[in-house]
């Protein structure tokens, strides 16, 4: 395998790892802010960042959990809507 191909694959894996870590962190922040008075703005910001504004909290939490587990955002949304 060429070095260029290896670098491209590594960049793709690094991107997936970063997305999974971001989803896990946002899920934790989302759950924390759902449970506290005044946390609505943070929850809305997380929903908007992931393209989930307008979904109920159960769906948002499920999608974030799926993405943290390795799903694509699109796949996680489709799974939640199924």
Image (tube, rainbow, N blue to C red):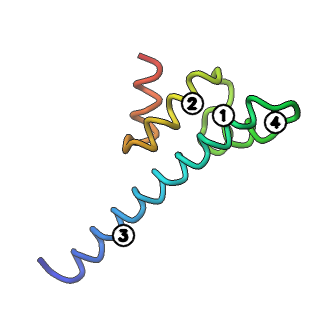
Sort mark 2 into few (<14), some (14-19) or many (20+) by Cα contacts within 10 Å: many
Sort mark 1 into few (<14), some (14-19) or many (20+) by Cα contacts within 10 Å: some
Point out which mark residue 11 bears: 3
Q: Earlier in the sequence, mark 4 or mark 2?
A: 4
How far separated are the C-alphas under marks 3 and 4?
A: 34 Å
Q: Earlier in the sequence, mark 3 or mark 1?
A: 3
Residue 24, placed above or below residue 59: below
Q: Earlier in the sequence, mark 2 or mark 1?
A: 1
Of residues 37 and 75, the one drawn nearer to the viewer in this rendering: 37
Q: Earlier in the sequence, mark 3 or mark 2?
A: 3
Q: Position of residue 12 (x, y in %)?
A: 34, 63
| Element assignment for label 1 | helix
Which mark lies nearer to you, 2 or 1?
Answer: 1
Q: Residue at x 39, y 65 (%)?
A: 14
Corner quadrant of residue 3: bottom left
Location of mark 4 (residue): 39
Q: Earlier in the sequence, mark 4 or mark 1?
A: 1
Sort mark 3 into few (<14), some (14-19) or many (20+) by Cα contacts within 10 Å: few
Location of mark 2 (residue): 61
Do callouts 3 and 1 mark residues in contact (Cβ within 8 Å)?
Answer: no
């Amino acid at each position: 395998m060429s070095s260029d191909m290896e670098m491209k694959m590594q960049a793709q894996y690094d991107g997936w790892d970063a997305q999974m870590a971001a989803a896990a962190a946002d899920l934790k922040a989302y759950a924390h802010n759902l449970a506290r008075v005044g946390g609505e703005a943070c929850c809305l910001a997380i929903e908007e960042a992931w393209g989930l504004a307008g979904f109920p909290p159960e769906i948002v939490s499920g999608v974030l959990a799926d993405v943290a587990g390795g799903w694509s955002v699109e796949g996680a949304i489709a799974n939640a809507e199924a």
